[in-house]
Image (tube, coloured by chain):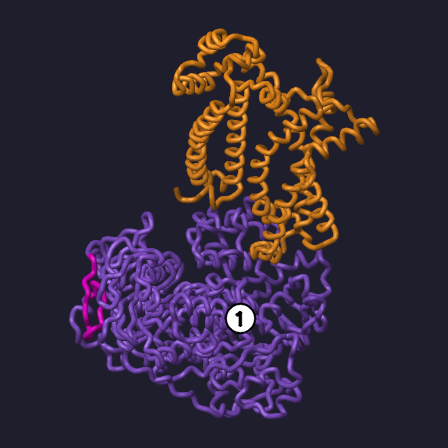
Chain colours: A purple, B orange
Amino acid sequence: MSGPVLDVADLRVSYTSQSVPATVLSRVTITIGAGEAVGLVGESGCGKSTLALAVMRALPANGTIEAGRIAVAGTDVLALTDHQLRAWRGSAAAMVYQDPTSSLTPTLTVGEQVAEVFRYHEGARRRAAAEAAADILAQVGLTPPRQFLGRYPHQLSGGQRQRVVIAMALAVRPRLLILDEPTTGLDATVQAGILDLLESLRGEFIDALLFITHNLDLITRTCDRINVLYAGRVLESGPVVDVLTEPGHPYTAALLACVPRAQDRAASVRLPAIPGSPPRPADMPPGCTFAARCGLATTACETAEPPLGSYRSRAPDARLRQGALGLAGTAGQGGGPARPGTADWLVRCIRAGEPASASPPPGSAPPPPSTEVLLDVHGLTKRYADVIGCDDVNLVVHRNETLGLVGESGSGKTTVARAIAGLAPADGGEIRWHDSPLAGRVARRPRDVARGLQLVPQHPDTTLNPRRRVGAILARAVKRLRGDLPVPELAAAVRLDAHHLASRAHQLSGGQRQRAAIARAFAGRPELVICDEPVSSLDVSVQAVILNLLADLQAERGTSYLFISHDLAVVRYLAHTVAVIYGGRIVESGPADQVFAGPRHPYTELLLTAAFRPGAGGAARPGAGGAGRPGAGGAGRPAAGGAGRPAATADEPGPATVTGCVFAGRCPVRVGSVCETEPPPWREPQPGHRIRCHHPAFAVAAVPGIQPSNGDTVLVAPGDG
Amino acid sequence: MLAARRRPVSMRGLRGYVLRRMLLVPVTLLVVSLIVFALAQLVPGDVGRAILGPYATAAQVHRLDAQLGYDRPLLVRYWQWVTGFVTGNWGNSPVLQVPIRSLIAARIGNSLLLAAVAFVIVVPVSVLLGVLSGLRPGSQADRAISVTGLALLGLPEFVGGTFLLVIVGVLLHWLPTTAQAPPGSGLATRLHYLLLPALALVPVLLGYLSRMARAGTAETAQAPFIRTATLKGLPRRVVLGRHLLPSALLPTLTVVSVQVSYLVGGLVVIEELFNYPGIGKLFLDSALTHDIPTLADITMLLAAIYLIISLLADIGYALLDPRIRLAPS
């Protein structure tokens, strides 16, 4: 057990495009000891996945490992022959990556795909392999496994598929497991289930873990150490707790600052987005790669690249904190104290640890929402065959207001959005616009309604014609929506310049495409813009840019938003009012601050627990104790977060037809059979804050213990001590 | 044990799918029969005149028409024709004066044999070439296969067939130049005689099928699940055989079944060129002699064959693709 499990030293990788090589990884050194979990973060295109693929020796055909060394458990990976490599992959090192929807073979059953690993690595016979597959499926929480063996990937939910991929990766217990964005695109509750699973598998099944993500919060929850990768270089490397509380490198600090904190509101605080974008591999600057975007950069930064130097926090108590929390994180794995590299904290910066000069800029301070009702949705209902799309949905959006619509995938968010936008008319209910009824289909609506009511889709690449120039797309939108802004001004409003306008849509980055989509929606001075998960596929740095932009546009133009998201941190930052939807029904609605402060519907509670446990932006690790939930203040732990962890059940949304409460099947504080038989009543714990629940705690507004002074909910389950 | 447990689910889904799909066959055939019958009415000249020739009197023609039933109302004639076709009572060819059924029966076997020989040659070869080039897109082998396939695609079968006939048959004497083996020959000899006409059918099909197989393979090779299979450490043959090909060749399967209809057109030319007594030659002869009833029955029969083959292809597709087989109905 001596020596690191993964030892990457001075790795240099380049991609050749049109016979011009460009270096994408430069002098990357990463080690992972036995029993250790190491995170790798950075924006898209910084080389995270390239590193993972290089370790697996699975780079695309135009990728070359030019220098350096990769060893896994003492084996020189770069020296393996093709034949050895085949046996090595899957048995010594395994990888799970993004997009579980397409990472399983559609024509083979889950059982066959898992069993294969045993058959080809351990020579197991068909029957024994099937038995082993059942065992490992049970280990990843797919129970009863017999029920899953014969299913095909398309019959599983996203979270279940990712569990299958994890089962395959862990089947023959590799020394090294690489997770590349394993939960991106999954709901917060499903994501929490996967993270819990990984945590439970550590020690017994997982030895060394490399966790790649752009989500800093996930690193906090899973890893011991963190490496920050930028433009193919490691800029900072150290213990997670230290790096994320007292970041040494300005880039790490900037990334952390992009995530909205619990107290941040769009009206008061602008998100400190990182200006610019990472340099392209083809034109790397001679000095520090981050200098061009760095608030601390001096001329010295631009001339010579700083070395990766040893660093100690300026904060005196940092060591102490690491001792306390870091130990708590590793105690459960029974790892020895002598893990290599744990104490190292390296930063590639000559001004490491200096505080960023500017404090977060003030928000764009839009005028408060008016009382004028812009959109009034009443009793909206839609069914698909035997599945409820949405059922009796009521929503009101005032002028200048942002309504956050929150729920998991399959909850009906997009059904509601499409019905309001007139793309898929509802079967029942009424949509009123400026107090007059609105036709179901967009084609039957008057032109000024189409102008005033616009949609920004989740994936702008599917709605922007990739072959057309952005300028032409916007010009057409301005003409069609009879806008009064010239295209360059419209583009300037979303921070796109002439260069972007001349580019074709497919040449833009994800964030630029999303800005183009926003510009198109704003071409005719809309009154209400429906944003369907507009930032969910973007890096935190780009997400901050888009959120600032939406806040600015609201301040300048008084636009209202129907903001649909499963990211509660984003909704809390942007929304004035919140509606929570589950199984096609609104279960809670009210002013954002009240909904987030509580009391909350058990489902809202579940979402919040999944999203913010153990601490968004905080430093607590799982197992570090109950403290550290933002706003929790150590008050009684909500029952939803205790026994009823959102695990495998979270993968499957509510049933198709329900007479009682749609959430009853998953509810941790179910009152009794009444939940299944009677539709829950609307309760109003505070004026304007409505909760649809049978639970007696909501029956009266001011029962002591329901609304503790610190604002956290205490929902006590019957019989819960 | 696992397979046995899985079966009830899949079979139920598959059975429903096949039943729905089978119902479509008679419905489509009914539509085809309407179109064929309508077209037959458009052909100039009447049957009696066609049989009796230009020197018969109008009365004679009229009498013959009445005798053959051509003076009855359209709907009645359509009904008689359709019921006759379904019950196997196909009547006589007014031109050749023999039962149409025996006429077709004698030849359909020949044509199916020729088509089968062509398919047995072309399907494995084109799939193999397509997969090979799809696995290494942009390689020299891929470019050679693609260019050859394209060139063959543009070559009409009467040109290709004539070249083959002249070079392989006449100049080199490798293969017999007629397609029909001497009467009483065994199957081996018959196949030997059929090789040259079958080869003449190959080029165009090869072009289509290998391009489909190439596209499917190249696209599937990029799929994340192939990377998963590779990174699991599976041997390459398993990655290819179990994970890649079933998905990659699904579109090719559909195209193969569509090519059957093309083959009918191809058979007309090739059978004429090699003087082979098949259905294609009969089809052409009937058209030339205005033998409308024979023409109509051949069309119906070919439509039925085509529908049954595409039904089989769809069932095969469903067997290979669980997303269709297990789709909720």
* Residue closest to the eye, A484 or A536: A484
Q: Residue at x 53, y 20 (%)?
A: B292
Q: Could one spot residue A188 in this view of the protein?
A: no
Which residue, given by chain and number where applicable, does mark 1 sit on?
A509
Quadrant for the C terminus of chain A in the image: bottom left
* Residue closest to the eye, A502 or A517: A502
For the magenta stretch, what is the residue range? A679-695
As drawn, which residue projects farthest toward the right? B172
Q: In which quarter of the view is residue B101 placed?
A: top right
* Identity, as a three-letter code, of the amino acid under mark 1: Ser
Quadrant for the N terminus of chain A in the image: bottom right
* Residue closest to the eye, B109 or A232: B109
| Horizontal and vertical percent position of residue A477 | 43, 67
* Residue closest to the eye, A605 or A614: A605
Q: Is residue B302 left or right of residue B171?
A: left
Secondary structure of the residue carrying tag 1 is loop
| Horizontal and vertical percent position of residue A707 | 23, 77
Chain letter for mark 1, please: A
Q: Residue at x 40, y 83 (%)?
A: A270
Q: Residue at x 68, y 61 (%)?
A: A61
